[in-house]
Amino acid sequence: MSEIDKSTLHSMTEELSEAENMTPKQIKILEAAIEIISEKGYSATSTSEIAKRAGVAEGTIFRHYRTKKDLLISIVKPVITHFSAPFFAKKFVEEVFQESHTNFEDFLYAFIKNRFEFAKSNIPLVKILLQELAFHSEIQATYKKVFMEKIYPAVNRTLNYYKEQGQIKDLPNDTIIRMMAPTIIGFLITRFIVQPNKEWDDEAEIKQTITYIMNGIGK
Amino acid sequence: MSEIDKSTLHSMTEELSEAENMTPKQIKILEAAIEIISEKGYSATSTSEIAKRAGVAEGTIFRHYRTKKDLLISIVKPVITHFSAPFFAKKFVEEVFQESHTNFEDFLYAFIKNRFEFAKSNIPLVKILLQELAFHSEIQATYKKVFMEKIYPAVNRTLNYYKEQGQIKDLPNDTIIRMMAPTIIGFLITRFIVQPNKEWDDEAEIKQTITYIMNGIGK
DNA sequence: ATAAAAAGTGAGTAATCACTCACTATAAAA
DNA sequence: TTTTATAGTGAGTGATTACTCACTTTTTAT
């Protein structure tokens, strides 16, 4: 597995289970909360229902989380961090500058494949993030911070590099991002949320997506 | 104004006001409900708050709508219908077959421009539709029906026509749709929901979007 | 002008909500 | 073993929820 994969792939629910200071019951609470909230939304989900599905007294939830909103935040924050994980990876910040032999198309493939697997392993969590991002300013603030400080600079460096290599059209980076992002995110949402049960040829779809992007912004 | 515009443009809230059998108070209720639900989501919105903002007794809401969910449905259903409105328009179903002189790029421009104006005039309604589509099976069913019976066939006919004209790559229609849809929808969401306050050069963005699509699927 | 129908009201209702707290059970430290 | 700290419990809290209904006000029909 390449550098970009190792650090960013496995499911976050598993990771929660491995977490240091977590009681078995606390893990059950998180799992139940993720399930129900992703199905019905945060507001329509009651703490009593979470407790019931977790096999736990309702009071136990409030031992671990001061409020229901605290519980939501502690679910969503790690998703934002992990979503930005590949932007910390070596492939992004180092390999690119060490004049690796990879071209932009190869890079795109690795990136999309990686985010594809992340989405695949974390559908309910991604659903919750997308839904609740619209309503909770704390989540918006966290996302904005990660985006501005990590994602946006890393993407800019990468695009600049491949521009210098003459592999990308000489459009403003913001324009390139505004075209690429909906294409990739739209693909993942279509694949895993809108039509999760359709029989997809994933490899073909990913390649198709790359071709579409390359036609749009490649030289 | 071209045929595609006339029938599909003006704001739906205005249209509600023009509606036949509606009391002034009922219109107030709808307006208040749209405002609050688009801000906080359906589940987090209480009927008492709607009544308060509408300047109406809570009981009045239930004179007009049997349940809170009935109110939501009666807000969202027309949005789905209007969203599909241009697919009924002459430009789509007739002009295309009457070998109009317009090429695919012109058609794309008219279409995106039209949906752009619709979104612009109905941001809160579009927000509500996007949010609640995820949770309510009645809304999903309505959307699926309109899509399968109206939108999908109209788009297919259009794509087939421009394919025969040799203006579009010989990709499967489903592939073309899977690429175009997120590009257009993603643009509108970015423009009006994610970054509504950014200073946009709308005309430039629309043209950029068209170029991107044409590179991807045009010949 | 009178009757009938429709629109609007707001106090009232049972159910549910997030959250608390005095208490018990378990685990770690002494 | 005894003490101390932590985890878990569930009945109980006041507030809020969607919704009802007997009643009043307004509009329409005659």
Image: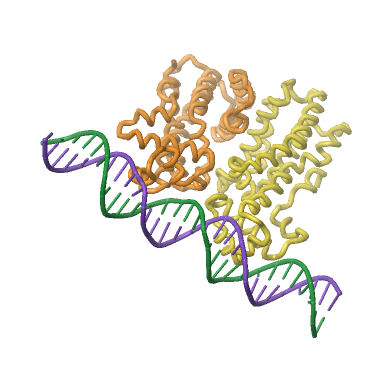
Chain colours: A yellow, B orange, C purple, D green
x%, y% of residue B151? 46, 33
Side (left or right) of C6 relative to B143: left
Q: How many marks?
A: 0
Given residues A57 and B149, the one toward you in this image is A57
Q: Which residue is at a point 84% across and 40% down the rendered structure image?
A: A90
Given residues B119 and B186, the one toward you in this image is B119
Side (left or right) of A40 relative to B30: right
Name the image quarter holding residue B183.
top right
The C terminus of chain A - image quarter: top right
Could one spot residue A121 in this view of the protein? no
Taking the view exactly as shown, the residue that stands out farthest to the right is A98
x%, y% of residue D26? 26, 35
Q: Which residue is at a point 66% across and 57% down the rendered structure image?
A: A65
Name the image quarter holding residue B78.
top left
x%, y% of residue B177? 55, 33
Could one spot residue B157 in this view of the protein? yes
Given residues A60 and B80, the one toward you in this image is A60
x%, y% of residue B146? 43, 37
Name the image quarter holding residue B80.
top left
Q: Which residue is at a point 65% across and 40% down the rendered structure image?
A: A140
Q: Which residue is at a point 55% across and 56% down the rendered structure image?
A: A46
